[in-house]
């Protein structure tokens, strides 16, 4: 059975969408796959559309939007290197609601790319309630493209815990690091242990003791996933160098801080899971990374195995 193939990117005519398109082309070039650029516009007669609909308006509107999308893609790709301009690129325009249509367009894709901000449907899809819908509806990993001040050539950074979602995110991060030819940093953030109960001090372990206790357990978890992904034949499937970091701080802060320090090109987090730490990955960690990370963020669903 053929697995997920291709990269889908949401565009809306904004500079941010142009950057997302470049990122999608880079991802596709590394994978040896094609890109489908999707522009979603309000359907005639919907709340987001303007003007009075008539029998021929939907077709005329679709044609006009497609022409504008072609001009945008031509202008956005013109300054790119020949290697990226040579990536197969298909253009699609769809009328309706952005989140479900983008998710549907990426149903059989290996990756869906969206811009961090924009001026139209795709921009709103990333910033508000629609952003959560895109992340929850997409059956493939979603890369949220973020502004980058300089070319990042550091390791891929991934947030981990004990959950199934964490293992899936780690598998994706391993494959991504291999495609990029860089190392991998697996980060766990742990909050400081309580020191008081009411007004009485507790004889709790210190934070350094907690970190020392967690380090070998986290390293064992990472090692098991690496062995599963890479297998025994490491000559044909070499594993990237993996560094395990256990930080005594909020998981989102730990991810963002490590990504900035190491010059990461991307941060990877899991979308769902179980247990205390995965509640953060699903909520504040994923959100914090998307909002504050110094690089692109990939949110990987559990279904992506």
Image (spheres, rainbow, N blue to C red):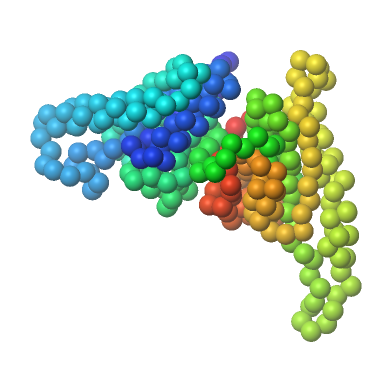
Image location of residue 238, percent across then percent down = 77, 22
- Choose between 219 and 176: the one closer to the eye: 176
Q: Is residue 270 visible?
A: no
Q: How many marks?
A: 0
- Choose between 53 and 61: the one closer to the eye: 61
The residue located at (80%, 16%) in the rendering is 235
For the C terminus, the image quarter is top right
Compared across the picture, whether 217 is left or right of 19 comes to: right
- Choose between 76 and 212: the one closer to the eye: 76
The residue located at (82%, 35%) in the rendering is 223
Image location of residue 165, percent across then percent down = 66, 41
Compared across the picture, whether 175 is left or right of 117 comes to: right
Image location of residue 237, percent across then percent down = 75, 19
**Vertical order, 78 against 49 (above or below):** above
The residue located at (66%, 42%) in the rendering is 263
Residue most toward the bottom? 199
The residue located at (34%, 28%) in the rendering is 75
Quarter of the image holding residue 77? top left
Image location of residue 213, percent across then percent down = 88, 53
For the N terminus, the image quarter is top right
Q: Is residue 128 visible?
A: yes
**Vertical order, 213 against 84 (above or below):** below
């Amino acid at each position: 059975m053929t697995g997920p193939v291709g990269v889908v990117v949401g565009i809306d005519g904004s500079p941010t969408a142009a950057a997302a398109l470049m990122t999608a082309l880079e991802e596709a070039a590394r994978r040896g796959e094609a890109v489908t650029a999707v522009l979603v516009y309000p359907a005639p007669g919907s709340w987001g559309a303007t003007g009075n609909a008539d029998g021929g308006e939907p077709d005329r509107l679709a044609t006009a939007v497609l022409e504008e999308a072609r001009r945008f893609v031509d202008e956005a790709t013109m300054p790119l290197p020949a290697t990226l301009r040579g990536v197969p690129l298909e253009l699609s325009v769809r009328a309706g609601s952005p989140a479900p249509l983008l998710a549907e367009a990426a149903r059989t894709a290996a990756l869906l790319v969206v811009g961090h901000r924009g001026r139209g449907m795709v921009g709103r899809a990333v910033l508000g309630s629609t952003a959560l819908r895109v992340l929850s509806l997409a059956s493939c990993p979603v890369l949220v493209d973020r502004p980058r001040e300089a070319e990042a050539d550091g390791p891929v950074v991934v947030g981990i815990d004990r959950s199934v979602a964490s293992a899936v995110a780690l598998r994706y991060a391993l494959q991504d690091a291999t495609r990029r030819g860089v190392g991998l940093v697996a980060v766990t953030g742990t909050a400081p242990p309580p020191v008081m109960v009411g007004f009485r001090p507790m004889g709790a372990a210190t934070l350094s003791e907690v970190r020392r206790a967690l380090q070998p357990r986290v390293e064992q978890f990472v090692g098991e996933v690496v062995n599963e992904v890479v297998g025994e034949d490491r000559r044909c499937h070499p594993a990237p160098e993996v560094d395990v970091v256990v930080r005594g701080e909020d998981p989102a802060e730990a991810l963002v801080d490590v990504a900035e320090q190491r010059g990461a090109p991307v941060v990877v987090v899991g979308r769902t899971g179980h247990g205390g730490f995965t509640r953060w990955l699903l909520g504040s960690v994923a959100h914090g990374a998307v909002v504050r990370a110094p690089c692109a963020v990939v949110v990987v669903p559990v279904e992506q195995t």
